[in-house]
Amino acid sequence: MQLDIEELSPVRKRVRITVSAPQVDSAFSKTYNRIAQRTSLPGFRRGKVPMSHLRKRFGAQATADVTEQLVGEAWGKALDDLALTPVGQPDFDAADRVQQGKDFVFTFTVEVTPDIEVRPYGDLEAKLETFTASEAVVDHELEHLAEQLASWEPVEDRTVTQDGDMVVLDYAGSIDGEAFAGGTAEDAELELGSGRFIPGFEPQLVGKTVGEEFTIEVEFPADYPAEHLAGKTAQFACTIKDIKAKVIPEIGQPLADQLGEESLDAVKAQLKTRIEGRFNGAASDEAKRQLKAQIADQYDFEVPAALVDAGVEDKKSELISEAVKGGKDFAAARAEADEQAPTLRDEVIRDVRMELVLDAMADKEAIDVEAHEVNAQIEQMVRVMGQYGARLRQAYRDPNRRAGLRRRMRQDKVLDFLLTKANVATVEREVPMHVHDDDGDHAHDHD
């Protein structure tokens, strides 16, 4: 097999393959033998049909089979021999008809990743903030942690509600004397002052007595999700049945015991580590974002169209999905995404270029990600996903999805490496007060 390669661009190659006549004849011979073994014609036993008869009757089929076989075997071997890693599927040119006794020549065009010369790492600059949590911040978080672990206990020494109480109540709502769906409940629990109910509802429950029956009036907001209630005034007949008060654990050894820790100092040490880790992690992500932006700016080379096209389609799908979730018609969402395609393409080209540079850096520095690291990352995501974790684990059994995750992890390792080699200015910061997790969970790790 003879190979000739033509460079159409840094990312597009045309390969010309010549399969010798003896190889062609051998392929035809094997193909006709297979046909003969399963063919019987009048006057001939199975496997004994003369070759002339086979050629006359099955020539077109044999030619198609040989063409498929030779092309399938040759183009894959050609990529290996030429050390080409294709991006997407090759584009085959029309080939001459394969014939016995003659060389078979065909060509294909394939996109490949470009050869990238990695620049000195010192050309990259970033600002990296490093955070330290003061004792005051840790103590503040400890108070928040204790509050998160609070319990609601029945109030025994009073019967009148106060702001901050958890009340147990029955209520029945109506508009113009007519009950409406979702407006009635029994033994509902509501924390007064939480702002979780209709605006104006909770304040009217303050100062009421257990067992008292009363009616309050509220107006649903104009933008209330239930359109049939938006902007309307409703009356609620209410009865307070019980009052509960928040009991916050005492900050001390009892709190440590509740968390399964040996001492309060151990709890505070974990809080400090958790807080600093969260802020330093976010700061590291920001520094990496700066590095990625500079890489995209500093490198300028042609990128494979297949990668760009796929990236644009992915971004369009994300835009359409978000728009549909927001209530937009699918056709309108798709039309808007199509309009943004030129801008999306520019963004994708930068992203693809940056990712290819990170891949080249990983190759240069022999940075890799082992299978056990990928598995550990998947399991971490599974834990975060909760009830949907099993579905996520199943999804990552797909080799392509695992490969994509491995590539992202490898690129993140490269960025960690760059933070040690690039021109990074470190700025020390103190963690600000009020650093609770967004979801309200306490900043504490325990089994």
Image (spheres, helix red, strand yellow):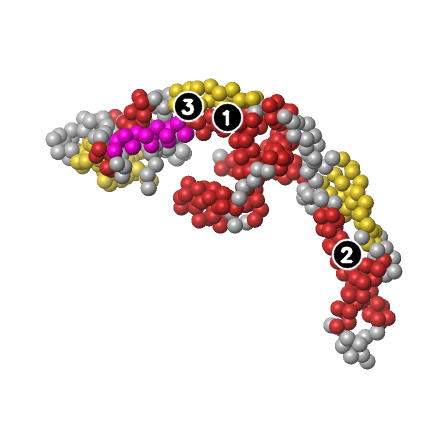
Q: Residues within 10 Å of mark 2 (few under 14, many from 20)?
A: some
Q: Quick one: label 3 or label 2, which is nearer the N terminus?
A: 2
Q: Specify whether 80 is left or right of 184.
A: right
Asked if residue 198 shows in the view, the reply is no
Dot 1: element? helix
Quadrant assignment for the C terminus: top left
Left or right of 403: which side holds 194? left
Report if residue 266 lies within the magenta region: yes
Q: Is residue 148 above or below residue 294?
A: below
N-terminal-most mark, 3 or 1: 3
Q: Give me the C-alpha separation between circle 3 and circle 2.
A: 63 Å
Q: Which residues are magenta?
A: 263-278
Are there few (<14), some (14-19), or many (20+) residues within 10 Å of tag 3? many
Q: Is 50 in the magenta?
A: no
Q: Nearer the viewer, residue 226 or 68?
A: 68
* Residue marked by disc 2: 70
Q: Which mark is residue 286?
A: 1
Instruction: Depth check: give the residue in front, 80 or 140.
Output: 80
Secondary structure beneath dot 2 equals: helix
| Residue name at image x 41 percent, y 23 percent | 131
Q: Amino acid at mark 1?
A: Glu
Residue in front for this viewpoint, 101 or 373: 373
- Give the amino acid type for the residue marked by disc 2 in the picture: Leu
Circle 3 is placed at which residue position?
131
Instruction: Estimate the spatial distance between the alpha carbons at disc 1 and disc 2, rounded to whole Å.
Output: 52 Å
